[in-house]
Structures are given as structure tokens and as C-alpha cells.
Image (cartoon, grey):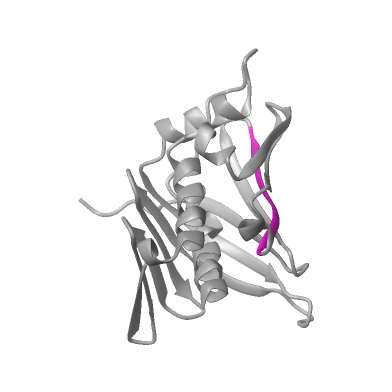
Amino acid sequence: MMRRTLYLLFLLFHGLVQGATLAFAAPSLDWTPESVLHALAEHRQGEARFTEQKFIGVLDTPLLSEGTLTFRPPDYLEKHTTAPRDERMTIEGDKLTYTRQGQTYTLNLAEHPEATAYANSIRGLLNGNAALLRKSYVLKLSGDRARWVLLLLPTDPRIQSLIKSISVNGSGDQLQTIEYDQSNDDRSVMTLLPAIPTSP
């Protein structure tokens, strides 16, 4: 049950890391993981579309999906997959909700300390809280303004059991992809696109 809970949180994390963010401040002399996270916090509210490829060892071709990602501070996260099937997963406060094929499941994170620790790591990234993230990850920023990577390496064994690393990739002030390398050697690559404007 706990591993399934962490897996659901991991799926939600695909994109919610940047679900509400499409731009970073340009690198400067003090360009650090903290400065990137500060830019995340400044531009965190909103919605983005995503496409995702999941590379699974037992399959010859990647699984494809698409949908929208939403983050509303301080703690509301949503991943809404619209294709190939409709699924919606949200975290708000201590409540995880997952809806698929007309069935809705809920989980109280407060009753699962390991899942709470993982959820707090997600929120730390979205809220630009480097101190909170460094409790569970080593943060490494590389590249230059034309091509940069923010690498998150888990130090918490509970997270290491699920993922090896998270690579957030961008160019200039635009976020391009988020890549997840899982502990079982599966991999996923998410590409972010601007949200479709709603009609007035």
C-alpha cells in the first residue's frame, strides 16, 4: 500500500514540478539552485499543457499521454491526463485524490509519514524552498543560459526506492523538459507547452 501511495505521488510529480511554471529568470553571477528555485516561486501559479513519453523496459515502444498540469499555492497540485484516457490526481493539504473511470480514491497523507515526506519535497520545489528540498535531495545546476539543467539526486532512502534522479531542462528563460530516471530503470520524459487561453 505504501509503495503504491508513493507511486501515485510520483505520477503526480511528473509535471507538477513545473506544472505552473514556464519561465525562469535569466542566469546571473549568483546563478545557483537557490536562484532557480526563487524564480520557480515567483512564477508558480498557473496551468500548462504537457505531453509525456514513458519508456518501460518490457515494452518495445513508449507509452504516450497528454493533459494539463496545475499548481495553486500554497499546496494544491493537480495532474489531469486527458489522453489516452481521462485521469485526475490532486493533492490538497493532507488529502490525495485519484479519479479514473468514474471511480475516486482518497488517502490521508497524515496517516502515512513516508508519503507525507515525499509530498513535502514536491511542495518544497514548487514553493522555492531550497532548505526543505536539501533535506531529501542534492541539488546540482549545470550548463549556461543557452542550455541548463537542474538535477535533483535523492538522499532520502524512501525516495531513492522510487527514483534515481529528476532532471529539469531548459534554454534561456524557457523550461523544456523534465526527465525522470526510476530505480527500476524505467524512464519518462515530459515536455511542457503553454496553456491554451480560455475564452473571455
Q: Quadrant of residue 112?
A: bottom left
Q: Is residue 191 left or right of residue 101?
A: right
* Relative depth, front residue between 89 and 173: 89
Say whether residue 169 is magenta: yes
The residue positioned farthest toward the left in the image shown: 200
Where residue 89 appears, as percent x and y from the top left, is 40, 68
Q: Residue at x 46, y 60 (%)?
A: 113
| Residue 184 placement: quadrant | bottom right
171 in relation to 67, above or below = above
Q: Majority secondary structure of the magenta segment?
A: strand
- The relative height of residue 27 versus residue 194 in the rendered view (above or below) is above
State left or right for residue 155 relative to residue 196.
right
**Which residue is found at the position 49% from the left and 50% from the top?**
122
11 in relation to 128, above or below: below
Query: Looking at the image, can residue 123 be seen?
Result: yes
**Residue 90 in sight:** no
**Residue 79: image location, x then y, percent:** 43, 63
x and y percentages locating residue 175 in the rendered image: 58, 41
Of 190 and 96, which appears nearest the observer? 96
Front one among 91 and 193: 91
Residue numbers of the magenta segment:
162-171
Residue at position x 55%, y 63% in the image? 10
